[in-house]
Amino acid sequence: MLISEYYSDNETPSGDINGSNKIFIANNTPNPVGSLEVFLNGSLRSRSEDYDIVADTITFVSAPLTDSILRICYRYK
């Protein structure tokens, strides 16, 4: 059985970047979860140090500052 795999590149997850919101939603659930790369203002962030992910929900330890640029890349099935 062939399982198709897709890649989301330079996606902007949904969620307000307002200095207080820590929760952002990807368009799809990263699979494998380890394929997720999170970039905040062009800098790669570290899972568990900077954010965590459950299903399609990314939760930051500290809310990104207003006007920050958040992008994610990941594989999904």
Image (cartoon, rainbow, N blue to C red):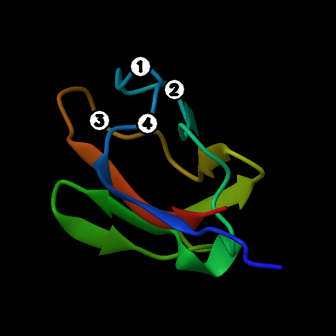
Cα distance between the residues tagged 3 and 4: 15 Å
For label 1, the residue is 16
Label 3 vs 4, first from the N-terminus: 4
Instruction: Give the answer, above or below, for where 19 lies relative to 5.
Output: above
Locate residue 12: give its quadrant: top left
Looking at numbered disc 3 in the image, what kind of residue is underneath it?
Leu
* Mark 3 or mark 4, whichever is nearer to me: 4
Q: Is residue 3 left or right of residue 36?
A: right
Q: Position of residue 63 (x, y in %)?
A: 46, 39
For label 2, the residue is 21
Q: Which mark is residue 13?
A: 4
Q: Is residue 8 left or right of residue 59?
A: left
Q: Would you call the spot at circle 3 few (<14 residues within 10 Å), some (14-19), or many (20 or more)?
A: some
Q: Secondary structure at mark 4?
A: loop
Locate residue 35: give its quadrant: bottom right
Q: Secondary structure at mark 3?
A: loop
Q: Residue at x 37, y 40 (%)?
A: 64
Quadrant location of the N terminus?
Answer: bottom right
For label 3, the residue is 65
Label 1 vs 3, first from the N-terminus: 1
Instruction: Give the answer, above or below, for where 49 lies relative to 26.
Output: below
Quadrant location of the C terminus?
Answer: bottom right
Q: Secondary structure at mark 2?
A: loop
Q: Which mark is residue 62?
A: none
Mark 2–mark 1 contact, CB under 8 Å? yes
Cα distance between the residues tagged 1 and 3: 10 Å
* Mark 1 or mark 3, whichever is nearer to me: 1
